[in-house]
Amino acid sequence: MKKRMMIGAIAVAFALSASAQVQMTLNTKKLGAEVQPTMYGLFFEDINYAADGGLYGELVKNRSFEFPQAFMGWKVFGNVVVKDDGPFERCPHYVVLSDPGHNDRRTGIQNEGYFGIGVKKGEDYRFTVWAKAPKGSSKIRVQLIDQASMGEKQDFASKDLDITSTDWKQYEVVLKSDRTFDKSNLRIFLKSGNPVCLEHVSLFPVNTFKNRKNGLRADLAQALADVKPGVLRFPGGCIVEGVDLATRYQWKNTIGPVENRPLNQNRWEYTFEHRYFPDYYQSYGLGFFEFFQLCEDIDCEPLPVLNCGMACQYQNWNNEAAHVPVDDLQPYIQDCLDLIEFANGDENTTWGKKRAEMGHPKPFNLKMIGVGNEQWGEFYFKRVEPFVKAIRAKYPKIKIVGTSGPDSEGENFDLGWKAMRQQKVDLVDEHFYRNEQWFLSHGLRYESYDRKGPKVFAGEYACHGKGKKWNHFETSLYEAAFMTDFERNADVVHITAYAPLFAHVEGWQWRPDLIWFDNTRVFKSVSYYVQQLYAQNKGTNVLSLLCDGKPLAGQDGQNGLFASAVYDKPSKQVFIKIANTGDSDQQIDIDLKGMKGSHAVETLSLHSDKMDAENTLDNPTLITPKSGKLTTTADKKGARLVDTLPAKTFRLYKVK
């Protein structure tokens, strides 16, 4: 009998334990720190074929024959030669197609694109070329082809184009694709006895983002817009530095007519021997004007980052000679000042006039600028100081972003913060790519930060699984958990951005990444949906959400729970974000102090039973937010939100 009673008591105790609720208190009446509109942003770097071959809509590789090997990306047949006295000073190369000398022979060129040329059924593609016929009129045939076709013919779109002038002119023809095909080629035949000169051979979808001729790939740009980001940091990253100063990113080379923007070597071409791409260069077709325009299109703040006179420190370790002497920094400082004028100056200024000539008379209203990327130590500190002084003197309202280097903590990190405080920059750019345990153990990272110092820009971060560097669900869940600390500390953290942003499935150098694509398709990682849930529901003010007087940040005794809450003034809603990183379901009971009666609650949840699961091109929606509905309960004390939060789940509650 006693034994049965003991067993019964254990069973009751177990049942009570299993149904025990995590009691939280949410004060809805006392609004805390403002959440900055820039809080959740995006960071663009030309890595993983993110620009050429990715977001930039151009489908032709090496369109101006400026690669060190002039025909890289091209197949050449018949009588073809390269010359370098073309009409564009900074892109002088062009090809001459001449009679092959026999009726049965043909002359032409064929471009492979970026891992093929992707086209979609029923879509139009605009072919343009600068050309001249030195001996009078000439003719070319322009084709989209399936080189491996087993059918009757290779070409599936074809048009002839008459070249009528002996002077350089731009010609255009539109091809319509009768199929969706990601491995097509562009082929151009000489169709006359007279020779023809071709320069800047280009093929764009007519349907680009906002239908611009020098536009962006529509589906990739739309994926950015759908996040509703507060800021876009560009153009990098390590490409800002270059392997050496000669290959650094120079914004002045990226504006003006695209035909005259010089080629630049991409430092990600050869960084990793195990992921080597010898044809990875920057056409600069996606330049600073286009970046500013994109920010305007997707309604976010631009954050350009400029070189501070330093080449990549990783590849020039402790090499003072690799960097510009401090006394010779004036041209680099002037680049920063000129960029601000390009963005904000009126049409009577030198650089404001250039912006207007490109089709944007109205200023872009730039508010902040980054000086240097991920640099550290005295090399950086002594160089960034004159930049800060010069920008402050001429543009005192522009916010300056410095950096604490590549470490999330430690000596270099501490020295970086100390130097940035001394120089009184406005924000400090922190970078941290860390494993699962780091993200789970740093849920209170920003509680101890100095409230009076520079604000935080978490400019590059991602959870890199230990031995699992791909976009699986588990790491995305831990990112969601960690991000509650951004939100709780919105008085300190003003901008955040996951990194990297884009990756071509056949051309990546680095992973995990937010958005993956091939030549015709795109899929969004689970991390993308985490970012989107935060960005679309960032609210306007932090609310206090506590458990036993403490924030839920994965601390001892909190069973792997992380939580934050905000109030949104425009919609008059409360947004609560909770991540259950534990292995068991948890009962949530939130006392909504200040609210009475019953309220409708919308939920959006990210969950997977398999921690290694990921979205793919063939299954792009395997793990996406799932919607649900709840109603708060009401008693004499007020409203309560009660729910069962499954294990390994991130859930957003929208309380109306």
Image: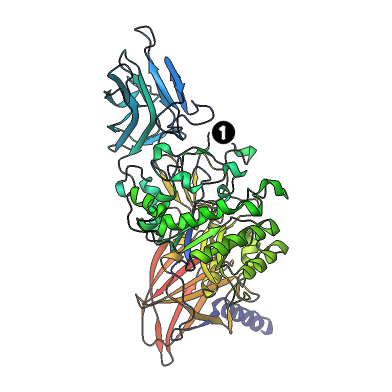
Which quadrant of the figure contains the N terminus? bottom right
- Tell me which residue sits at (34%, 55%) in the image: 347
Query: In the rendered image, which residue does mark 1 sit on?
Result: 278
Q: Nearer the viewer, residue 473 or 313?
A: 313
Q: Nearer the viewer, residue 17 or 299?
A: 299
Location of residue 24 in the rendering, given as x and y in whole percent from the top left corner:
52, 81
Res 202 → quadrant:
top left
Location of residue 300 in the rendering, given as x and y in whole percent from the top left corner:
41, 61
The answer to whether residue 88 is above or below residue 11 is above
The answer to whether residue 222 is above or below residue 269 is below
**Pointer 1: residues within 10 angstroms few (<14), some, or many (20+)?**
few
- Tell me which residue sits at (45%, 83%) in the image: 31
Location of residue 497 in the rendering, given as x and y in whole percent from the top left corner:
51, 60
- Tell me which residue sits at (45%, 45%) in the image: 254
Q: Nearer the viewer, residue 380 or 569?
A: 380
- Tell me which residue sits at (34%, 7%) in the image: 103
Determine whether, in the image, residue 490 is placed left or right of residue 360.
right
Location of residue 383 in the rendering, given as x and y in whole percent from the top left corner:
64, 57
Q: How many marks overall? A: 1
Instruction: Say which amino acid is labelled 1.
Output: Pro
Which quadrant of the figure contains the C terminus? bottom left
